[in-house]
Structures are given as structure tokens and as C-alpha cells.
Amino acid sequence: MSSERSGTARVPRALRGTRAVVLDTDGVITDSARVHAAAWKTAFDAFLRPRGERPFDPREDYLRYVDGKSRLDGAAAFLEARGLRPSEAEVLAVAGHKERLFTERLRAGGVDAYPGTVRLLRALRSAGIPLAAASASRHAAELLEQAGVRGLFDTLVDGGEAARLGLPGKPDPALFLEATRRLGVPAEHAAVVEDALAGVEAGRRGGFGLVVGVDRARTPATRTALIEHGADRVVDDLAELLEQEGK
């Protein structure tokens, strides 16, 4: 594990009293949410177009129906929201199409970590706070490695682990609770950091001491939705939690 952990630095004021932090991957740690959204748009539109349905909105529909969920849960949630009543085979086909597209785009372009998130992670490690990454994606480990931040985390619970352990998807808090179990910290003493509505709701349902919503869209509607789903505070970038230290 990284040698950056010393336990001598102070925890940022916004997270004082927190004994562990669990962060979602896509859209919180890495900028891969845009790659997911683009892949979903292509896959959904290929299904919607022959049926005369309006296209998938890669911002609003992505945030409301698929962000933070497994591929199958996300595909089913969106198509059912459109009143299409897809068969199991159709859900599998759309989800499989999205997976192929995402993998191709990931390998072609790669992803980066958000600088503000990296700053916060390093500050927390210096303060001796255990960190976990938790994601419904089976690509989480690869994403963290590509972004050069895997070594900042004490544990990772991804989609593959969730399937192996039989953990239900968000908004069920099981993924986050497994992360805190591995860190040895009760949920009430831990923070969850999420950009997805389903993830924020999972943090609330899990009884976490602090739920931080990340509004990458930077819109009043998104901020309001994150709060309504359970965020205790909302920031546009995680560096804001450090900037509040001097206020």
C-alpha cells in the first residue's frame, strides 16, 4: 500500500469525525461516466429508433435511470420507464451491446482521475483515514489502474465482487456496507461519496454518517435531486471539501 499514509495530518473539517470514506468510481474518482453515458446512448438508441421512440438523453436519462446501477438493472430500469416492457432477452441484448461499446472505448481512450478527487484522497490518506472504492462496474479495478490511483485505496468492491457475494445493486446499500465491513468501520462512522442518485440513496439507506453528493453537471436540478435522494451536502468537485478547511 502507498507510503503516503502517516496519520499525522488533520482530517479536512468537512469530514471531521469520519473514520472511513467510501467512494464510487465512475464520475467521482474517474471521468469514465462520460464513456458509460456515450455507450449507453448508442446502445439504447439502436433499440429505440426502430420503435419510433425518442432518443436516450446521455445526461438526464443516464443520471436518473442507469448511473450507479449494474448493466442489467440499468437497461431494465430505463426501458421500463419508457413503458416498453422489454423481454429478458431484449434487456440482455441492450446491456451486452453497451458493454461491448464501453470496453472498446475504454481501451481506445482510457480515463483520468479528477484532480480534485486525487487531492482529497491524498489528504485523507495523510490523515490516516481508510479508503474504499465501491462500484457496480466490473471494470472498476481497470479504471483505477488506468487513472493511476488504485494504490490510494485500502480495498475495492466492484461488480465482479458483488456478483460473487450475491450483493444486490444500488439503491440497496449492500455494496457500500461490504466496503465498510472490510475497512472495519461501522457505517454510522463512515462517509459515502457518490454522483449517482441510486448511490446517494444507498448511502442514506445504509445509515452512513455522511453522504456527499457530487454534481458534475453543475445544475440546480441535479443538486436538488441529489439532496432529495439523501445527500447531506453537495459539491461540484471534491476539492471543495479541502477549500472549506480554511473557512
Image (spheres, rainbow, N blue to C red):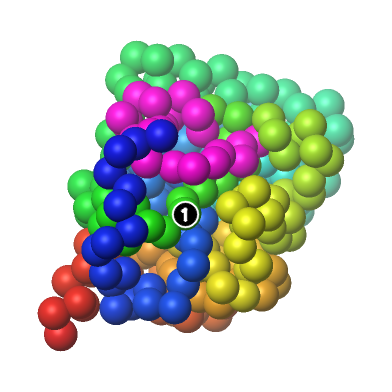
Which quadrant of the structure image shows residue 187?
A: bottom right
Q: Residue at point 85% right, 33% down?
A: 88
Q: Report the amino acid beneath label 1.
A: Pro
The reply to whether the magenta stretch includes residue 148 is: yes
Q: 53 or 245, which lies in front?
A: 245
Q: Residue at point 46% right, 24% down?
A: 142
Dominant secondary structure of the residues highlighted in magenta in the image: helix
Q: Is residue 158 left or right of residue 130?
A: right
Q: 116 or 15, which lies in front?
A: 15
**Looking at the rendering, in which quadrant would you find the N terminus?**
top left
The answer to whether residue 116 shows anywhere in this view is yes
Q: Residue at point 39% right, 26% down?
A: 145
Q: Residue at point 63% right, 57% down?
A: 184
Q: Provide the secondary structure element on which disc 1 rests.
A: loop
Q: How many numbered marks have been drawn onto this rendered protein structure? A: 1
Q: 1 or 48, which lies in front?
A: 1
Q: Residues within 10 Å of mark 1 (few under 14, many from 20)?
A: many
Q: 2 or 88, which lies in front?
A: 2
Q: Is residue 214 left or right of residue 103?
A: left
Q: Position of residue 188 (x, y in %)?
A: 62, 75
**Looking at the rendering, in which quadrant would you find the C terminus?**
bottom left
Q: Position of residue 18 (x, y in %)?
A: 46, 72
Q: Position of residue 38 (x, y in %)?
A: 43, 34
Query: Is 57 located above or below residue 129 in the figure?
Result: above
Query: Is 226 located above or below residue 33 in the figure?
Result: below
* Magenta segment: 140-159
The reply to whether the magenta stretch includes residue 18 is: no
Q: Position of residue 118 (x, y in %)?
A: 27, 47
Which residue in the protein does label 1 denote? 130
Which quadrant of the structure image shows residue 170?
A: bottom right
Which quadrant of the structure image shows residue 106?
A: top left
